[in-house]
Image (cartoon, grey):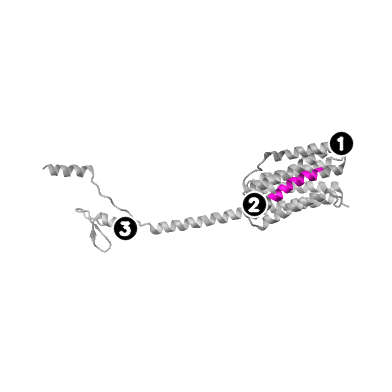
């Protein structure tokens, strides 16, 4: 039979390693909304395991810490999914009262009955409530956005929900449920990093496509642009311009043929005065 304390101590070490991996990923890669919530959820999971180990020496304190941080773990998990996939937080901030309500329920059960089975069932109830919301959220997202990684994430969270539901029954021993749940957390963390990489690759591909389209538009514009360069022969007297074929033409016509410029005619003040003076004579 597996030793429960050994399993929880092992889970603390694994959680610490996952935190280190996610912090290292945060330093070396681009992260998206929800990343800090996921790190926070793993920290809460580690503290919940510490609370379980304290139950042997400080029963009430251990139960309170375990209940509070276990529910906070999956609440941050859900909030991280919302930010990552939908760029928003949980709509109702009252969700964050769930850990407090869970602690109150555990304290009441502990003070009235001191029944470990009821405490575990209470914990499983609150966590299952959050996991149900997580599964529903991922189900909605998976319908809108197809992807193997997203479907795997939905499946792992559903499996996590089933493990907590079965932990309330006499068919599954607590140590086995916690052991499997720790494996699920490791897989979910790996999957989360893969989702980050997939999103980064999608953004990179989109940026490359936008750059290609911009270059194509620029090439088209440059192809349509007519530029004058070199020396242009021009008559000193009438200001006519000689083109490449040797023909002479007025300046306006030459510019119109070589560019997209169109001329509109008017008269400057100096010429206007000259014309008026000539008319008076």
Q: Position of residue 36 (x, y in %)?
A: 67, 44
* Residue 3, horizontal then vertical, whole percent: 87, 49
| Residue 31 visible from this viewpoint | no
Q: CA distance from mark 3 to mark 2?
A: 53 Å
Relative to 173, is 27 on the left or the right? left
Q: Which mark is residue 112?
A: 1
Dot 2: element: helix
Q: For the point 79% across and 51% down, which residue is it?
A: 163
Q: Nearer the viewer, residue 91 or 270?
A: 91
Q: Specify whether residue 42 is painted magenta.
A: no
* Quarter assignment of residue 194: bottom right
- Give the numbered dot on residue 258: 3
Instruction: Give the residue number, with chain letter if any, for mark 2.
Output: 196
**Mark 3: few, some, or many residues within 10 Å (few <14, many ≥20)?**
few
Circle 1: element type: helix
Q: Quadrant of the C terminus?
A: top left
**Quarter assignment of residue 46:** top right
Q: Main secondary structure of the magenta part?
A: helix
Mark 3–mark 1 distance (CA, rounded to whole Å): 96 Å
For the residues labelled 1 and 2, the Cα–Cα distance comes to: 46 Å
Q: Nearer the viewer, mark 3 or mark 1?
A: 1
Q: Residue furthest bottom?
A: 245
Tell me if mark 1 has few (under 14), some (14-19) or many (20+) residues whose alpha carbon lies within 10 angstroms of its own: few
Which residue is found at the position 30% from the left and 58% from the top? 257
**Which numbered disc covers residue 33?**
none
Residue 60 placement (x, y as % from top left): 84, 37
Question: Where is residue 197 shown, x and y percent of the image?
Answer: 64, 54
Q: Is residue 147 left or right of residue 163?
A: left
Q: Is residue 157 visible?
A: yes
What range of the chain is rendered magenta?
122-136
Q: Secondary structure at mark 3?
A: helix
């Amino acid at each position: 039979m597996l030793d429960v304390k050994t399993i929880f101590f092992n889970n603390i070490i694994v959680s610490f390693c996952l935190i280190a991996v996610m912090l290292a990923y945060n330093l070396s890669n681009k992260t998206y909304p929800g990343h800090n919530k996921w790190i926070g959820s793993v920290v809460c999971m580690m503290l919940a395991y510490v609370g379980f180990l304290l139950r042997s020496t400080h029963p009430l304190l251990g139960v309170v810490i375990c209940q509070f941080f276990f529910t906070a773990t999956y609440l941050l998990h859900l909030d991280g999914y919302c930010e990552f996939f939908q760029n928003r937080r949980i709509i109702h901030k009252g969700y964050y009262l769930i850990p407090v309500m869970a602690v109150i329920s555990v304290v009441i059960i502990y003070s009235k009955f001191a029944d470990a089975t009821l405490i575990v069932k209470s914990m499983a109830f609150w966590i299952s409530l959050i996991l149900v919301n997580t599964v529903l959220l991922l189900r909605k997202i998976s319908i809108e956005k197809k992807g193997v990684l997203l479907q795997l994430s939905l499946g792992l969270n559903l499996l996590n929900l089933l493990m907590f539901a079965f932990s309330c029954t006499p068919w599954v021993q607590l140590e086995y449920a916690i052991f499997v749940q720790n494996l699920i957390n490791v897989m979910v963390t790996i999957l989360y990093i893969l989702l980050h990489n997939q999103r980064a690759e999608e953004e990179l591909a989109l940026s490359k496509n936008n750059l290609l389209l911009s270059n194509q538009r620029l090439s088209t514009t440059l192809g349509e642009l007519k530029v004058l360069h070199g020396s242009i022969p021009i008559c000193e007297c009438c200001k006519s311009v000689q083109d490449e074929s040797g023909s002479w033409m007025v300046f306006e016509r030459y510019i119109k043929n070589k560019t997209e410029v169109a001329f509109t005619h008017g008269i400057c003040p100096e010429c206007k005065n000259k014309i008026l003076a000539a008319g008076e004579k």
